[in-house]
Amino acid sequence: ADESSGYESESAGGERAGVAAAGGTRGRQRRARTAFTSEQVCRLEKTFQRQKYLGATERRKLAAALQLSEIQIKTWFQNRRMKLKRQI
């Protein structure tokens, strides 16, 4: 029930800080947050329970299976490890 994608670190506060650091009007457009499907989150969580770190091969296979980029998989695992660290 208390399941999430692990993307709590991407909050609106970071967006405001980015605008302030860029001088208010200039700056790169922030990439939209990925909306993971429940099936994707379930598969990511199951994989995370088995292994906390993925190698390049495992990451490539999982990205292909879930139709996500390798960077999205890598970021999800980084955020999920940080979430676990906060919980502990």
Image (spheres, grey):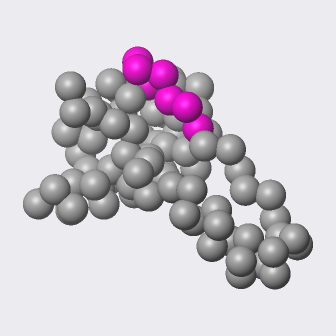
Q: Is residue 11 above or below residue 3?
A: below
Q: In this view, does 39 lie above or below 15?
A: above
Does 39 appear in magenta? yes
Please provide percent x and percent y for residue 64: 56, 28
The N terminus lies in quadrant: top left
Which residue is at the front of the view, 58 or 42? 42
Please provide percent x and percent y for residue 49: 19, 39
Residue farthest along the right direction in this orientation: 26
Please provide percent x and percent y for residue 34: 58, 38
Q: Residue at x 58, y 49 (%)?
A: 71
Q: Residue at x 49, y 43 (%)?
A: 73
Which residue is at the front of the view, 14 or 63? 14
Q: Is residue 23 above or below residue 54?
A: below
Say if residue 54 shows up in the picture: no
The C terminus lies in quadrant: bottom left
Does 83 appear in magenta? no
Q: In this view, does 75 lie above or below 47?
A: below
Say if residue 11 shows up in the picture: yes
Left-right relation of 29 to 83: right
Q: What stretch is highlighted in magenta?
A: 34-40
Q: Which residue is drawn at 41% across and 51% down?
A: 8
Which residue is at the front of the view, 35 or 46? 35
